[in-house]
Image: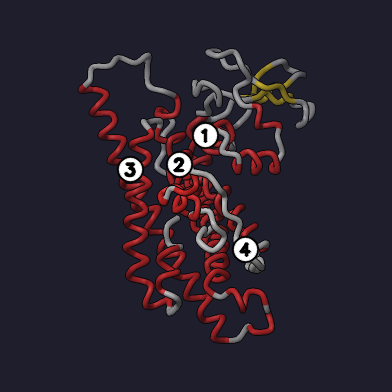
């Protein structure tokens, strides 16, 4: 059953379609918060992608819980509602989720392999004429390595999420905290929502990494001595070391985007699905990182590339 993207209250329908025209529809109102249940049903794909990159909670709830929901169909000539089978509709939506996971997995693995190959082979990436059979073999090895790491990461996240849900329910029952009721997010929880939310949260990371792959930071050196600030504050050794972290030659933007921003986005997506404290979602992401890093350690010799760089970029 779909939910309201504002208060997560389950609602039977998101919008009503009148049989005289497919474009003649009316959004349903949530009975609890009195707002439109899901305004995203009228938005195009570009708006959904932009809101995914901006990490908006509403678009996550729309894509995870409401996408593919059957509308209420009203026949104006007979002034009656055409009934639908809820069980068949739910089964079709679950099948569509797994197919969407396969498509997103294929795309994200391919993009991840290209980005990591570009980081490991910057000269070949800039000059297509240097492409050879050996280069193709290296790319295929990186592609297989990314696929295995992705499977390991999602497997670790799914197992950790199931464990966290049991622990969260046990702590809630042990603390004798009475809630108004189980939220709509928990009522409509499915295992397929976990990898799907992680894939959606990867849009922010891969978008920025793709931009950094196309427009690389400048590597040109500026002539002359670097500018030094004068004053008692900048004479402190700790302050100077802290400021030097942001120097061009020390700050790895790709590493920051992949590890820090990617981890925050994945934790945000999981919190939408698990509906628990951020501490638990952080623990789930850490478990996934540990499993993925262990698999990357096993694959680094087989991939036959710069092992340190491979491990540095193995964290999602």
The quarter of the picture where the C terminus appears is: bottom left
Q: Please tell me the numbered disc located at residue 213.
A: 4
Label placed on residue 269: none
Q: Is residue 134 visible?
A: yes
- Look at the numbered disc 2 and give the secondary structure of its residue: helix
- Mark 4 vs mark 1, CA separation in Å: 33 Å
Q: Nearer the viewer, mark 4 or mark 1?
A: 4
Residue pictured at 36% horizontal, 31% vertical: 277
Q: Which residue is mark 2?
A: 193
Nearest the viewer among 229 and 292 is 229
Q: Is residue 52 left or right of residue 312?
A: right
What whole-number distance in Å separates the C-alpha atoms at marks 2 and 4?
30 Å
First in sequence: mark 4 or mark 1?
1
Using the image as rendered, state which of residue 138 and residue 228 is in the foreground: 228
Distance in Å between CA atoms under marks 2 and 3: 18 Å
Residue in the picture at 25% in, 34% down: 167
- Is label 3 or label 4 in front? 4
The residue labelled by disc 3 is: 283
Residue 194: percent from the left, percent from the top?
43, 43
| Colour logic | secondary structure
């Amino acid at each position: 059953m779909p939910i309201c993207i504002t208060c997560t209250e389950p609602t039977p329908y998101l919008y009503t379609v009148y049989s005289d025209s497919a474009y003649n529809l009316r959004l349903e109102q949530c009975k609890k918060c009195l707002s439109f249940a899901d305004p995203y049903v009228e938005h195009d794909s570009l708006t959904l992608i932009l809101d995914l990159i901006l990490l908006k909670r509403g678009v996550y709830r729309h894509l995870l819980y409401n996408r593919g929901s059957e509308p209420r169909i009203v026949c104006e000539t007979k002034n009656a509602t055409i009934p639908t089978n809820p069980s068949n509709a739910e089964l079709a939506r679950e099948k569509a989720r797994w197919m969407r996971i396969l498509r997103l997995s294929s795309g994200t693995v391919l993009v991840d392999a290209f980005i990591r190959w570009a980081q490991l082979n910057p000269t070949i990436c800039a000059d297509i004429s240097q492409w050879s059979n050996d280069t193709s073999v290296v790319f295929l090895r990186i592609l297989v390595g990314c696929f295995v790491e992705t499977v390991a990461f999602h497997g670790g996240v799914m197992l950790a999420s199931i464990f966290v849900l049991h622990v969260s329910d046990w702590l809630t029952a042990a603390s004798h905290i009475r809630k108004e009721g189980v939220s709509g997010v928990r009522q409509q929880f499915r295992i397929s929502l976990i990898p799907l939310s992680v894939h959606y949260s990867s849009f922010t990371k891969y978008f920025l990494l793709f931009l950094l792959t196309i427009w690389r930071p400048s590597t040109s050196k500026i002539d002359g001595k670097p500018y030094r600030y004068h004053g008692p504050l900048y004479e402190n050794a700790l302050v100077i070391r802290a400021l030097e972290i942001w120097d061009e030659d020390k700050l790895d933007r790709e590493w920051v985007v992949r590890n820090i921003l990617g981890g925050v986005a994945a934790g945000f997506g999981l919190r939408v699905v698990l509906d628990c404290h951020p501490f638990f979602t952080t623990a789930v992401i850490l478990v996934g990182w540990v499993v993925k890093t262990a698999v990357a350690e096993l694959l680094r010799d087989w991939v036959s590339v710069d092992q340190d760089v491979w491990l540095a970029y193995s964290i999602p």
